[in-house]
Amino acid sequence: MIDPESGLDGVRDVGIRAGTVAAVSETRLTGARVLDVGGQVVAPGFIDLHSHGQQIPEQRFQALDGVTTALELEAGAGPVRTAYARAAAEGRPLNYGYSSSWALARMRVLAGYEPTGAVNEVITQLGNEAWQQSATPAQVVRILGLIEEDLSEGALGIGILIGYAPLIEPSEYLQVAGLAAGAGVPTYTHTRELVENNPDTPVDGAEELVRAAGETGAHMHYCHLNSTSTYHVDRVLSLVERVQREGSAVTTEAYPYGTAMTAIGAAFLAPEHLPRRGLTPSSIRYLPTMEWVQDEARLTELRRSDPGGLAFIRYLDDDDPAQFGHVERALSFPGAAVASDGLPFHWPGEAPDPHTWPVPPGTLGHPRSVGTFSRFLRLARDRGLMSLPEAVARLTLAPAKVLESSCPAMRAKGRVQPGSDADLTVFDPERVSDRATYTDPLVASTGITHVMVGGALVVRDGEVVPDALPGKPLFGGKEPA
């Protein structure tokens, strides 16, 4: 058993009662049901801070990857009360929760878009240029008001997709950070471009994030630092390390892949902007047809006809040690969490009933939606990135600590201790591995034996338990003074 908080790494029996860890014992425990997992690791359930794939099928694949809590924090949802209500009505295999979406608030104020609470609608609207424009002071007040309303209804902080609206006034970002600081909640930022990639950016994305932390006192969480920094990871990590040492609340996350995925209509994928990162249209693969985009004309056509369509972006070569080294350093940064940035699946026809299992043949996605956590454990083992207990901490305690000051329920997750939630992942440390690839993305991980959410098995003997929907909502809320 591994408990990252106490440092326990040894053979123990774990007793569970009513969804809670009741005992951790060096002597044999008895119970009404017994799982014999000798020779394997019992760890806290893995926590994903950055999961856009929030429907039942996506969560089942994440369960097969050891995840017990999957949160939509970078893009967020809105209104959050509607998003929570929809998830509760449908049921979820995993624990879930949402931040307030700054992007959706802007879409409502600047583009007249009325959100439905569907957790993937931010992605479908990313290519709408209307929400990306600078806002007047009065419009900023309305945007902040919508976010405040979400926070009052339990949002887990504020998701800020400023990288998709890269020309807005820096003062608006500071005001959003100030709102978060006053509410005592984190922000989760997809940063603007770095000055190395775009000398004309209004402000360097990394500098903007750390400045907001210093000026407002807000907890600024740096989303997928690997994909926004690419070849400049070392410079960005050095900056983060310095401000952390000075006392700023800045945390980071990364995912273990060199190829990203987002809506093809994203501002930074406009043909004229691709050279900033050394990209060409052929660096992009359009998910619905799995075609590599041949030229600028085809890219322009796809951005016009399907701006919300998902696409791979080949930033770094996973098989090139020098290039993938940037990803490994982002993953190995002290205290960094591992987060998937997993995305909704693309269905070959009409979306099936969400309870259907297995998913229809031909369903597509990014392998990080399916294999992030087992891939990280494999890399830690095979490449010697870190010890097994430290790797487990990056999947459990590190993400829990990002949230626990503003979400008291998170203090019972990321640990295996008496009184903690019985969210547990059992895996074989020698066999755990990802199997999903860019061309065959929905192949479940191997070596994950059992996964338990609130004491209920959602994966047993490596297989999904189809009728298990024990996931519970996580809400934000400040502790009483």
Image (cartoon, rainbow, N blue to C red):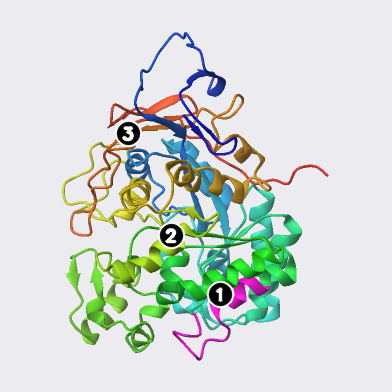
Q: Is residue 222 above or below residue 29?
A: below
- Residue under the point 42% across and 42% down: 388
* Residue 363 position in % (x across, y down): 21, 51
Measured along the vertical axis of the image, is residue 115 above or below residue 386?
A: below
**Along the polypeptide, which appears first: circle 2 or circle 1?**
2
Task: Report the mark closest to the observer, 2 or 1.
Answer: 1
Label tally: 3
Foreground residue, 139 or 40?
A: 40
Which circle marks residue 121 in the picture? Answer: 2
Magenta-drawn segment: 194-211
Q: Is residue 234 left or right of residue 273?
A: right
Q: Amino acid at mark 1?
A: Ala
Q: Which residue is mark 1?
A: 206
Residue 428, label in figure: 3
Q: Is residue 407 magenta?
A: no
Q: Quadrant of residue 450?
A: top left
Quadrant where the C terminus lies?
top right
Q: Tag 2's secondary structure?
A: helix
Q: Amino acid at mark 3?
A: Asp
- The residues tagged by marks 2 and 1 sit, at their Cα atoms, a distance apart of 27 Å
Label 3 and label 2: CA atoms lie apart by 37 Å
Work out whether residue 320 or residue 162 is closer to the camera in this orientation and state it.
320
Circle 3 — which element? Answer: loop
